[in-house]
Image (cartoon, rainbow, N blue to C red):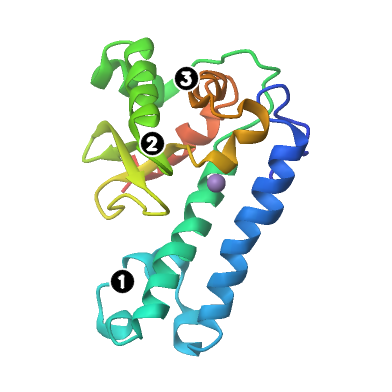
């Protein structure tokens, strides 16, 4: 984790982060590694390459290995982004600034419109998955993905995501996904989101 286990209190407590990071995320890492252990040639690829590869390296794998890379590789990818998208903010809702604030104004009109749309997507993701803010060809969009799927990142570049698997919030909020999402806005690491946006705009 890029912060202490108690850094996100009172939004997410230590127990939640221990389970989420050390158990759930670790399981995706371990299972992905176990799958890749049989395929030395895949170990040379980056995670992004593995998840977006269209060549026949992946097509030639057994179904089970392909599924494992999709599910566990997606789990690793999504969780790395998710944990890095939050930071200690003493539960004060800090608004975006810089280029990301300008883009939000341009694409949504107001911060509150963006917030409502991200929240709607997070609430509307039936079952497990994620709601995302992505950068696509100069514009911002809200998308959602089920399970451990990732967005089509060749065009929709990830800026921010909220994990709405129950394991992300159940210990703190039980079934109240709504309350978890509301609280999430006060731990968003906007400087990190800004950094991601700038890296996409440079290309
Ligand atoms: Mn998760």
Of 28 and 78, nearer the camera is: 28
Per the image, label 3 sits on a secondary structure element best described as: loop
Of 15 and 90, nearer the camera is: 15
Per the image, label 2 sits on a secondary structure element best described as: strand
> Real-space Cα distance between discs 1 and 3?
33 Å
- Give whichever of discs 3 and 2 has the lower sequence position: 3
Q: Residue at x 66, y 24 (%)?
A: 11
Task: Place residue 50 in its image quadrant.
Answer: bottom left
Q: Give percent across and percent down for residue 17.
A: 70, 41
- Give whichever of discs 1 and 2 has the lower sequence position: 1
- Residue sitting farthest toward the left: 137
Per the image, label 1 sits on a secondary structure element best described as: loop
> Real-space Cα distance between discs 1 and 2?
23 Å
Q: Residue at x 48, y 80 (%)?
A: 44
Q: Which residue is mark 3?
A: 96
Q: Which residue is mark 1?
A: 53
Q: Give percent across and percent down for residue 158.
A: 38, 43
């Amino acid at each position: 984790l890029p912060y202490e286990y108690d850094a996100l209190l009172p939004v997410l407590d230590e127990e939640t982060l221990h389970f989420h990071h050390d158990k759930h995320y670790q399981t995706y890492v371990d299972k992905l590694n176990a799958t890749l252990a049989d395929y030395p040639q895949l170990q040379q690829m980056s995670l992004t390459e593995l998840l977006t590869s269209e060549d026949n390296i992946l097509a030639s794998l057994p179904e089970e290995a392909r599924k494992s890379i999709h599910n566990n590789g997606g789990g690793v990818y999504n969780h790395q982004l998710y944990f890095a998208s939050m930071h200690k903010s003493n539960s004060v809702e800090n608004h975006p600034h810089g280029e990301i604030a300008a883009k939000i104004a341009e694409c949504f009109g107001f911060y509150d419109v963006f917030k409502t749309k991200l929240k709607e997507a997070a609430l509307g993701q039936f079952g497990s998955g994620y709601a995302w803010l992505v950068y696509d060809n100069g514009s911002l969009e809200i998308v959602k993905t089920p399970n451990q799927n990732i967005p089509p990142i060749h065009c929709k570049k990830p800026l921010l995501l909220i994990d709405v698997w129950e394991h992300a919030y159940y210990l703190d909020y039980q079934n109240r996904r709504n309350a978890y999402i509301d609280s999430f806005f006060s731990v968003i690491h906007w400087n990190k989101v800004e950094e991601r946006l700038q890296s996409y705009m440079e290309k």
